[in-house]
Image: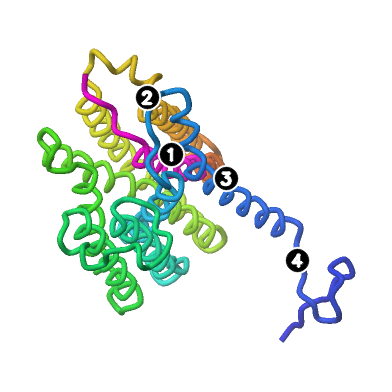
Amino acid sequence: MSSIRPTADTGGGAGAPRVSAASVQRSVTVLALVALAALIPLLGPSVALRGTGEAAAPGAGGIALLRAVLFAAVGVPAGELFVAHLARRVPGAPREDAPRSWAPAAAAAGCVAALGLASVVATGNLVPRSVSDMDIGGLYQSRDGALALLEVNAFVVAGLCALSRRPATQVWPLAAVAVAEALRAHPVTELSPLVGSGLTLVHVICAALWTGGLLYVLRTLMRWRHTAPAEGAALLGLYARVAAVLLAAITATGVCSTLRRMPPGTVLEQLTTTAYGRTLVAKVLLVVVVAVLALWARHRLRRAADPLTAHSPARAEVVVLGLVVTVSAVLTAVPVPIRW
């Protein structure tokens, strides 16, 4: 058995493992991206509301951050299940050599975020100062409270499913969270709420599969880069074909939802004069960047001598998709535009 060589530049004693500069750089980059992703929902509502004359909801930044975590907690395991299904369709793909699942950690984070959002609902949509401010029993008596409790329980079940011998059963509690979010976004007082909920449900599911799927594809490519590079390229190509359909569905449902909340005659004005419109513009611009990166990755996949060079634009794509998730969370925390 070979021993680990000590290195003089690490400052450790004999037998200290080498820490490469590339590893340190990757860690710093990841921490910077996480910090940026946290700042967007925290500061986004106040920036979007500036000069609009609209009132900010109490704790809008914190609520947006919790909802961003909740969205990510749905996308990560959904993407893993989705890509695992695609990998089974790749001939010769190593079945047992898969990246470690992040689903249990995602379920734990989602449960914490759902509990935070439920505490806000239990306080009458205010930020709770203490436990005594919350009416826990009242959660069972309101629609929003019941949906908040459903999300908490769904993440608990999803975590247990992820740790079980049949992790594919996570699909049901994750679907329950998506349904709860779709219903929450469209109260019964809205015009045709079921239509809006249906559009939001399709939008959330497609976005979760697109974002979480690309993340897991990239993790799989890193895992297979030496043992099965051709199969990794085939998996990325298969994902790219499905992602094109997901993007079309996201675009269609997004446009329909926008026109339901901002009638055609007022769209242009509300895009610049309301916080919802400004946030929506930011989201659309990021999605355009994602689409360009996706096309670039697909071009490399088809034309480059080494198809795995598509990994670079795909990696940038998943970073921008993470920003899209955080901006989407801000969209849920700013006031809904008034139909004129």
| Front residue of this view, candidates 70 and 231 | 70
Say whether disc 2 or disc 3 marks the residue closer to the N-terminus.
3
Report which residue position mark 3 lands on: 36
Q: Residues within 10 Å of mark 2 (few under 14, many from 20)?
A: many
> What label sits on residue 294 in the rendered view?
none
Q: Residue furthest bottom?
A: 1
Report the mark closest to the observer, 1 or 2: 2
How far apart marks 1 and 2 lie (CA) works out to 15 Å
How far apart marks 2 and 3 lie (CA) works out to 24 Å
Q: Secondary structure at mark 3?
A: helix
Magenta span of residues: 317-340
Say whether disc 1 or disc 3 marks the residue closer to the N-terminus.
3
Q: Is residue 87 magenta?
A: no
- Say what amino acid the circle numbered 2 marks: Thr
Determine the residue positioned at 17% across, 37% down: 196
User: Could you tell me residue 245's position as x and y percent?
Assistant: 28, 38
